[in-house]
Amino acid sequence: MSTYAKGKLGNGPKMSKGLKGWLAFVLIITAVGGYFILERLILGLDTTNLSSITPWGAWIAFYIFFVGLSAGSFLLSSLIYVFGMHQYERVGKMALFTAVVCMMVALIFVLMDLGRPERAINAMVFWNVLSVLAWEIHFYVVYITLLVVELWIAMRADLVRLRPSDSLRGKIARLLTFKNSEVTEETQKRDHKWLKILGIIGIPLAILGVHGGTGALFAVVGAREMWNSGVFPIIFVVSAMVSGTALLISIYIIKSKATKTPIDTQMVTSLAKMMVAFLFIDLLLQFYEYLVGVYQLDSVGLQSLATQMGSAYSWSFWGVQMGLGALVPIIIVFNKKLGQSVNWILFASILVVIGIIGVRFNIVVPSQIVPVFPGMPAGDYYPTFSEWMVSVGIAGIGLLMFTAGDQLLPLEESPEASGEEE
C-alpha cells in the first residue's frame, strides 16, 4: 500500500487545528440554530411571517435548493459510473455522499415548514395516488435508499482495505462490511457493474421523480401563473446540474486546500466548463419561459414578472440570480487567464451556488405576492430573524453530517481503486 493510501485509508485524517476550529464553528451555529428550531417546534408557525396568502417562504426555497444540489450531485456521479467519464472519478464517491446529505437537509427544511411536523408520516401511510406531493415523498424514500446502496458499493473496496486498521475508521469499516469480504478483480468488476445498474435506475428517478417531480409540485398549481408551466420541471432539472456541479467543484477545491493535497487542475477546469454549459442551457430555458409569459399578456402573469424584476424583490433577481450567479461566473470561466486559475474557479463556483439560492427564492416568494384574483389582498413576505436562524441551524446539521462522513468514510479515490501509485 502506498504512503498516500496509508494516510487516507489506514489511520484516517488527524484532528488538525483547522479541523478543530471548523468543528467548533459548526457546533456553535448548530447549537444557536437548534434553539430557534426548538422554538419553532414549540410555538408553531407564529415565529414566521408565513400566512394563508404566502404559505411558502424561505424554508421551501431552501428545500428546493437542497433537492437540486442532491439531484445535481447524483447526476454528476452518473456521468462517471454510467457513462464512463473517469476523468471525474476523484469526486465520484464525494458526489454520492453529497447527494445523500443534501437530500436529508432538504427534508429537514420541509419538516420545519409543516404546520404539524409530527404528522409527516401520514403522507407515507395514507397515500393519495392523485397527489403529486404524495408521489414525491415516495420517490424521495426510494431515491435516498438507492443513493445509500450505491455509495456503499462505491466505497466497498476501500472499506475492505480499512478493516485491519485499529482506528475509528477501521471499526466503522468492519461494521459496514462482511467478515469474509475481499477485494479481487472479480469483485471490482461486480461492483462496477452494480454501480452502472443503479446509476441507470437512478437517472430517470432523479430527473422525473426527484427534482423534476419537485418542479411539478409548482407546475401543477394552476392558480399561480408563474409556476403553471410544463417547462418548469425541466428548468428544475437543468438548474440542479448547475448547482450540483458548482457545489462539488467548491467542496473538492476547499477540501484539497485544507488538507494540502494536490488539486487536479485539468479536472477542475473541465468541470467549470461543464458548469457554465449547464448554466447557459438554464438561462435559455428561463428566457423562453419569461418570453412566453410576456406574450400571453395575462395581467396576473405580467404582475408576477414585474414583481420579480421591478419591485422591492428585484434585487434578488438582477443582483443575485443574474449578476453574481450567472454573469460574473461566465466571465471568469471564459477568461483565458482566470479560467485556468483554481482560486478563480472556486470563486465562480461559490457564486453560482449563491445564485441558485437566489433563483429558488425568486421562484417561491415573488409569485405569491400578486393576488390570485383582483380585489384580494397582496402578499407581503420577508423571512423573520427566527426563520433565518432556523435555516442556519439546519445548515449546521448538514455540515455536521458532511464533516462526520468526510472524516470517517473513504470518500477519496484511493490509488488501489484507480490503479495509480503516488
Image (cartoon, rainbow, N blue to C red):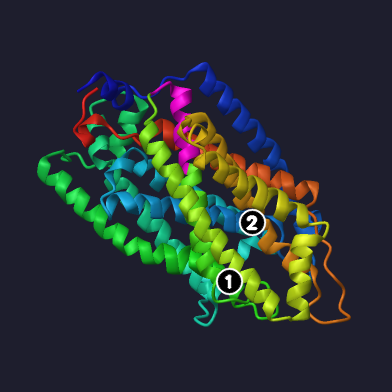
Label 1 CA crowd tier, 10 Å (few <14, some 14–19, many 20+): some
Q: Secondary structure at mark 2?
A: helix
- Extent of the magenta region: 248-261
Which residue is the site of mark 1?
217
Residue type, label 2: Val
- Taking 132 as reference, is 30 above or below it? above
Q: Nearer the viewer, residue 72 or 157?
A: 72
Q: Nearer the viewer, residue 252 or 202?
A: 252
State which quadrant residue 252 falls in. top left
Quarter occupied by the N terminus: top left
Main SS type for the magenta part? helix
On residue 287, the disc is none
Q: Nearer the viewer, residue 31 or 394?
A: 394
Label 2 CA crowd tier, 10 Å (few <14, some 14–19, many 20+): many
Quarter occupied by the C terminus: top left
Q: Residue at x 68, y 78 (%)?
A: 295
Residue 402 lies, in percent from the top left, at: 48, 39
**Residue 315 located within the stretch drawn in magenta:** no
Tell me whether the residue at label 2 lies in contact with that at label 1, contact meaning CB atoms closer than 8 angstroms: no
* Separation of residues labelled 2 and 1 (CA atoms): 16 Å
Q: Residue at x 52, y 56 (%)?
A: 280
Residue 348 lies, in percent from the top left, at: 56, 39
Q: Residue at x 49, y 62 (%)?
A: 237
Residue 401 lies, in percent from the top left, at: 50, 40
**Residue 249 located within the stretch drawn in magenta:** yes
N-terminal-most mark, 2 or 1: 1
Residue 347 lies, in percent from the top left, at: 57, 35
Residue type, label 1: Leu
Which residue is the site of mark 2?
359
Residue 229 located left or right of residue 192: right
Q: Secondary structure at mark 1?
A: helix
Whether residue 114 is visible: no
